[in-house]
Image (spheres, grey):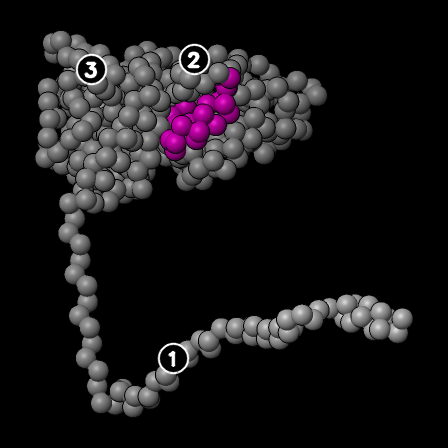
């Protein structure tokens, strides 16, 4: 099954809430939505006296995404549980997020998405720095963990993230360091969500940002449970690909499918390239890479795939991609030859039955005709045929 959807709440959505966005995606005939967790407003505070003994899930108007015990100094804290009672000296990290105010909102949104058959994923904040200062590295790790908490509450299956700039020194050293960090994050996400949410990393179109095709595929082979994202515009920008025929998509899809045992996650949009590392995403009709050959490639095979529109037009291009795929599928089925009808089986002596004479068809009886009344005999001339005339004649005789 192939799902199509936008990367963010549809532009045509009037309510601008997450629930309205899911409903609009369903009404537009789409079946996927990537939630953008871009703006992060965390607040760290001690637990209030009235909150002690309650669970983070039960707090009203509080979206708790982390519970820390005092004295814990670990860049990879153990996953907390939303059902564990809050202790007296715990530190709570809450988020001010416009798409949800508390964990009950997340649960309601999850139920709506499941009822409408809309697959949810969540994109972590775009700016991460795993090679900078210890504070920047810890902040990036925390943001990915908070994204996993929100994804688990929403029922999303993936948390998508970038990997940031390369660190100082050789790039091989940066690959080893980032693989260690991402390995710890992937393990944290799986432990917290009990395997329901997976961490996904996507390639970058800039040569100075970690995430070439080889680096992403090698990391997913090394880190257990890590999922690669096939971001076609980024790969086309980084490798200067044209992607004009269906054959050019085949090695890309084959390599990423081999590294992803489940449903393949894909991003697509138009692309304008200016120089090495200089590009911008555009609507599909105005970009240098076209979706038509990719639709032809998908129509010729059976894939379990999600295609997300990262175009500036969001849901419009998601619907356009779905239309192109359906057209390619229709053309393929029209070219498919009609299978010949199976030959009739000859009758055998054992199976043949003596033919019984057919009864003659019943003929309809002739219609009944009503007999015509017999004509009265004519009275002789000179006499009246009326009985009254005879009475008058007899009376005149008596006189």
Whether residue 188 is visible here, answered yes or no, is no
Residue 351 position, x and y percent, is: 27, 86
- 168 vs 34, left or right, is left
Q: Name the quadrant containing residue 142.
A: top left
Picture disc at residue 282: none
47 vs 128, left or right, is right
Instruction: Work out which quarter of the rendered image holds the N terminus and state it.
Output: top left
Indicate which label's residue lies in the foreground, 2 or 1: 1
Q: Earlier in the sequence, mark 2 or mark 1?
A: 2
Q: Secondary structure at mark 2?
A: loop
Q: CA distance from mark 2 to mark 3?
A: 29 Å
Residue at the spot 67% in from the left edge and 23% down from the top edge: 51
Q: Which residue is mark 2?
A: 39
The mark that comes first in sequence, 2 or 3, is 2
- Examine the rendered structure and indicate whether residue 186 appears above or below residue 13: below
Which residue occupies the foreground of this view, 310 or 216?
310
Asked if residue 30 is among those painted magenta in the image, a careful observer would answer: yes
Name the secondary structure under disc 3. Answer: helix
Q: Is residue 275 magenta?
A: no
Mark 1, secondary structure of its residue: loop
| Residue segment shown in magenta | 15-36
| Residue at mark 3 | 286
Mark 2 Cα shell of 10 Å, populated few (<14), some (14-19), many (≥20): few
Q: Which residue is mark 1?
A: 361
Q: Earlier in the sequence, mark 1 or mark 3?
A: 3
């Amino acid at each position: 099954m192939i799902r199509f959807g936008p990367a963010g709440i549809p532009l045509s959505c009037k309510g601008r809430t997450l629930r309205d966005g899911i409903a609009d995606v369903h009404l537009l005939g789409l079946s996927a939505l990537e939630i953008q967790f871009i703006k992060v407003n965390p607040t760290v505070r001690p637990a209030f006296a009235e909150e002690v003994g309650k669970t983070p899930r039960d707090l009203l108007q509080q979206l708790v995404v982390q519970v820390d015990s005092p004295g814990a100094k670990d860049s990879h804290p153990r996953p907390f549980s939303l059902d564990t009672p809050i202790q007296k000296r715990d530190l709570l990290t809450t988020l001010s997020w416009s798409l949800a105010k508390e964990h009950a909102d997340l649960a309601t949104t999850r139920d709506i998405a499941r009822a409408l058959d809309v697959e949810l994923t969540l994109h972590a904040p775009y700016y991460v720095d795993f090679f900078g200062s210890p504070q920047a590295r810890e902040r990036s790790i925390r943001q990915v963990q908070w994204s996993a908490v929100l994804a688990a509450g929403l029922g999303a299956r993936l948390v998508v993230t970038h990997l940031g700039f390369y660190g100082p020194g050789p790039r091989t050293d940066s690959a080893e360091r980032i693989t260690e960090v991402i390995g710890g994050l992937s393990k944290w996400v799986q432990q917290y969500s009990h395997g329901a949410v997976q961490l996904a990393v996507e390639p970058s179109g800039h040569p100075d940002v970690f995430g070439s095709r080889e680096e992403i595929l090698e990391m997913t082979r090394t880190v257990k449970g890590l999922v690669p994202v096939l971001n076609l515009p980024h790969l086309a920008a980084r490798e200067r690909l044209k992607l004009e025929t269906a054959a050019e998509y085949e090695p890309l899809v084959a390599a990423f499918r081999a590294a992803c045992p489940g449903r393949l996650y894909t991003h697509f949009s138009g692309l304008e390239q200016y120089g090495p590392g200089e590009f911008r995403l555009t609507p599909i009709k105005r970009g240098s890479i076209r979706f038509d050959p990719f639709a032809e490639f998908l129509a010729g095979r059976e894939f379990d795939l999600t295609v997300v529109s990262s175009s500036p037009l969001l849901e419009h291009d998601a619907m356009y991609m779905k239309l192109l795929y359906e057209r390619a599928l229709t053309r393929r089925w029209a070219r498919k030859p009609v299978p010949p009808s199976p030959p009739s089986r000859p009758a055998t002596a054992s199976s043949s039955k003596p033919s019984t004479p057919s009864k003659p068809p019943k003929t309809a009886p002739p219609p009944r005709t009503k007999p015509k009344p017999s004509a009265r005999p004519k009275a002789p001339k000179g006499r009246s045929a009326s009985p009254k005339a005879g009475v008058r004649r007899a009376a005149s005789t008596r006189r």
